[in-house]
Amino acid sequence: MTREEAILRMQDIGCYNPDVVDHAEWKDGKIALRTADGKSFDFPADSRLDDFIKADDVKAVLIGHRFYSPDILSLELSEGFDFGSGKITILSSKNCIVRAVSAELNDLRSAGCGICTFCREGGFQLAGIIDAMMKPGADRKQLDLAVELSEAMMTSCNCPLGAETALPVLSALEIFRPEFEAHCGKGSCPAGECSAFSTMYIDPFKCTGNGDCIDVCPEDAIEGKPGFISMLDEFECTKCGKCIEVCENDAIRFASGRLPKLPERLTKVGRFRK
Ligand code: SF4
Ligand code: SF4
């Protein structure tokens, strides 16, 4: 089957746009794919990832446990391209890279046998350092330490899993160092996903004043009344997220940095002006 035929077949059965490829590997000189919903495809060598993945907002591509920039999608894949564990995930601008690295580390650590001290202890330390970056207080020294530890794991562990554990950290840092630096020192999460660095607010143009959020807030951090734009007190809020779950209007948002202009007193829905 040619590349064009493979693309058409994928389109025919509605699998042209899987967010995640569950497994990709080389088989008999072809790329054998299994999509997240269990369908299988073969693509010839020299196909491109964007032959079978279409996404609008691509910040990073995670193949196995290695992070790539979006350019990888348009690269023709010659035989031998390393799919790692085979899973392909797309990260959008709303996904925090530090958080994604942390998830990969947890995944890899749970797969380790625990016999090799460097892998076991190194993985534990590395996960702790990365997790600390998602909270205020991390600095550049932690970033340097993560690099040092990852490089040591690349060469000192007894089996490839130890080196693989360092891969998400090193590959992500190669492309997204500024995002790590924002967490370590500037105390911000550019993607807005690390709630410890963000402030919550209620979008006055989306709130319909139905009060659902007020009813669920365990801290009484939201003020409002029927038909009025609700107001969230950031000092009372513990960022538990309960109000986000119930707001059908997607009005409760996170902001990293400056908040937009918000009402200073209770204001009727539709009356607030920028
Ligand atoms: S649940 Fe959403 S729409 Fe309803 S009052 Fe709260 S913020 Fe406004
Ligand atoms: S995140 Fe939790 S504490 Fe904060 S306003 Fe929403 S419900 Fe209340």
Image (cartoon, grey):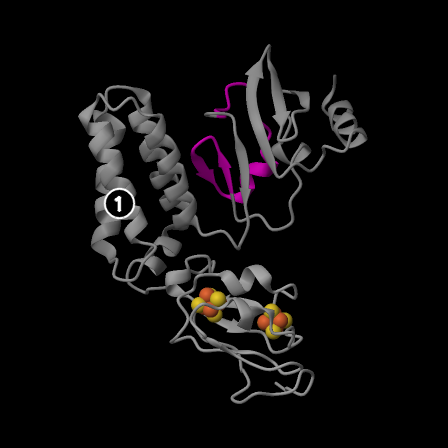
Q: Which residue is mark 1?
A: 128
Tell me which amino acid carries mark 1.
Gly
Using the rendered image of the protein, determine whether residue 155 is visible from the camera's viewpoint. yes
> Could you say where residue 151 lies in the image, as x and y percent from the top left?
25, 35
Q: Nearer the viewer, residue 57 or 270?
A: 270
The quadrant where residue 103 appears: top left
Residue at the image point whose x is 47% and y is 25% from the top: 85
> Could you say where residue 246 lies in the image, as x and y percent from the top left?
59, 62
140 lies left or right of 43: left
Q: Is residue 148 magenta?
A: no
Locate the N terminus by quadrant.
top right
Q: Is residue 63 magenta?
A: yes
Outermost residue toward the top in this view: 28
Residue at the image point whose x is 63% and y is 83% from the top: 228
Residue at the image point whose x is 61% and y is 20% from the top: 31
Using the rendered image of the protein, determine whether residue 46 is visible from the camera's viewpoint. no
Residue at the image point whose x is 40% and y is 37% from the top: 104
> Could you say where residue 88 lies in the image, as x and y percent from the top left?
54, 33
132 lies left or right of 89: left
Outermost residue toward the left in this view: 117
Question: Does 89 appear above or below 236?
Answer: above
The magenta segment? 61-83
